[in-house]
Image (cartoon, helix red, strand yellow):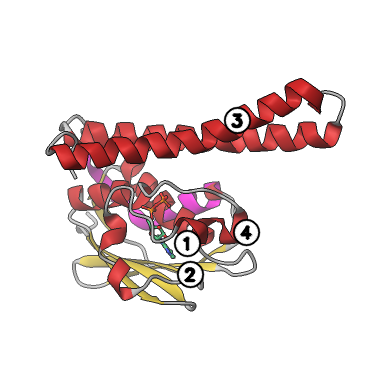
């Protein structure tokens, strides 16, 4: 969906955004009211309120950042600065900085690509956030980077809840979520359905093809086919 293209889409978009902003705001208002009446003297309630307010504010912030990203993208105001990058090194550093004990790099083949590193990291984050979010906390997410003749294959493999065949094409649409309750199943985090839209935009700008293999209840693998360049 491009912003402002047709009235029906615009109406649905405004409806989606309003709804996504209303939920965290309702939570914040509720806790502030509670704190005002009885919270200041109750340390347990105080801590619960601060944690929930913080989480809701983070959700709103990430929603607004994704919206601004896509708005700039739609208006052609999202310039990329592509340079030769050692993908394996970028990926390794990104995963170290991500600091999740649940992520394991199982294969890491050296390769060079032409890309904007900051955008690539944003795309990796979308796949990893989801892989962790939609799988149990005691499972591992595997990352695998291999190469062929003139392409690299990057896989994000989770052992989570999986994605039904009929949903697979739609998950890249803006605001598409399979079922809101699924997100809360594991860690109570809420999602807004924009992460994969942003990831897809970045992938398209780099000639990266995304495929999804998944089995309900067994897990999902997001497979990225990335054009490589020769190391000089
Ligand atoms: P959000 O930014 O809210 O996570 P996304 O655009 O990233 O939204 O994802 C859209 C939908 O795709 C979600 O409803 C989620 O159910 C599904 N999804 C994405 N990745 C996975 C995954 N690894 N396992 C299961 N479901 C997934």
The first of marks 2 and 3 along the sequence is 3
* Residue 214 versus residue 46 in the image, above or below: below
Report the residue that reaches farthest toward the top.
36
The first of marks 2 and 1 along the sequence is 1
Looking at the rendering, the stretch of residues picked out in magenta corresponds to: 81-97
- For label 2, being within 8 Å of ligand 1 is answered yes
Q: Is residue 185 magenta?
A: no
Q: Which residue is mark 3?
A: 28
Is 87 placed left or right of 187 in the picture? left
The first of marks 4 and 1 along the sequence is 4
Measure the C-alpha gap from mark 2 to mark 3.
33 Å
Q: Would you say residue 67 is visible in this rendering?
A: yes
Measure the C-alpha gap from mark 2 to mark 4.
14 Å
Say what secondary structure mark 1 lies in: helix
Label 4 environment density (alpha carbons within 10 Å; few <14, some 14–19, many ≥20): few
Tell me the tag on residue 131.
1
Q: Which residue is mark 2?
A: 158
Quarter of the picture holding the N terminus = top left
């Amino acid at each position: 969906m491009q912003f402002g293209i047709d009235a029906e889409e615009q109406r649905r978009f405004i409806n989606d955004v309003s709804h996504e902003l209303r939920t965290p705001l309702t939570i914040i208002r509720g806790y502030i009211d509670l704190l005002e009446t009885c919270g200041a003297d109750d340390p347990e309630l105080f801590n619960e309120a601060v944690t929930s307010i913080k989480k809701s504010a983070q959700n709103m912030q990430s929603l607004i950042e994704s919206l601004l990203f896509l708005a700039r993208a739609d208006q052609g105001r999202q310039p990329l600065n592509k340079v030769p990058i050692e993908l394996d090194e970028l990926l390794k550093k990104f995963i170290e900085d991500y600091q999740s004990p649940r992520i394991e790099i199982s294969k890491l083949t050296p390769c060079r690509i032409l890309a904007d590193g900051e955008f690539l990291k944003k795309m990796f984050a979308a796949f990893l956030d989801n892989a962790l979010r939609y799988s149990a906390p005691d499972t591992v997410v595997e990352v695998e980077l291999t190469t062929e003749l003139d392409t690299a294959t990057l896989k994000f493999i989770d052992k989570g809840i999986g994605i039904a065949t009929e949903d697979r094409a739609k998950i890249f649409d803006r605001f598409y979520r399979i079922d809101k309750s699924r997100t809360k199943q594991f860690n109570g985090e809420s999602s807004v359905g924009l992460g994969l839209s942003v990831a897809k935009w970045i992938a398209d700008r780099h000639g990266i093809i995304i495929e999804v293999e998944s089995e309900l209840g067994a897990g999902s693998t997001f497979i990225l086919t990335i054009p490589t360049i020769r190391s000089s």
